[in-house]
Image (cartoon, grey):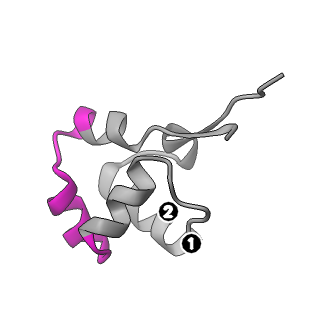
Amino acid sequence: MPIIVNLDVMMAKRKISLGDLAERVDITPANLSILKTGKAKAVRFSTLEAICRELDCQPGDILEFRNEE
């Protein structure tokens, strides 16, 4: 899939655990894990906004497009 999720990188930079971030953005740790591993098919803008707010980052810091030609 050409969309790469760099959530684990941002979490490491901010020194926050999956459980702490899940609690802060009001999402289950299981669903956040699915997003973090790139297995999610979609993400709500409200969830992305909450993650960016908590990690003090931009959506582009978390999501990346790589053309697979």
- Residue placed at 40% from the left, 67% from the top? 50
Residue furthest top as drawn: 69
Where, by quadrant of the figure, is residue 66 drawn?
top right
What's the residue at 49%, 62% (across, down)? Answer: 48
Range covered by the magenta-colored residues:
12-28
Q: Is residue 67 magenta?
A: no
Q: Quadrant of residue 3?
A: top right
On the rendered structure, is 54 left or right of 38? left
Label 2's element? helix
Q: Quadrant of the N terminus?
A: top right
Q: Quadrant of the C terminus?
A: top right
The kind of residue on which mark 2 rests is Leu
The answer to whether residue 53 is visible is no
Q: Cα distance, mark 2 to mark 1?
A: 6 Å
Residue linked to disc 2: 48
Residue density around tag 2, few if under 14, some if 14–19, many if 20 or more, within 10 Å: some
For residue 66, the mark is none
Q: Which residue is mark 1?
A: 44
Question: Relative to 17, is 34 above or below?
Answer: below
The residue at 48%/65% (across/down) is 49
Q: Which residue extends farthest right? A: 69
- In the image, 53 versus 40, the foreground residue is 40
| Left or right placement of residue 19 versus residue 58 in this view | left
Q: Would you say the residues marked 2 and 1 are in contact, meaning their CB atoms lie under 8 Å apart?
A: yes
The image position of residue 27, as x and y in percent, is 32, 75
Element assignment for label 1? loop
In the rendering, at what x and y percent does residue 31 appear? 37, 68
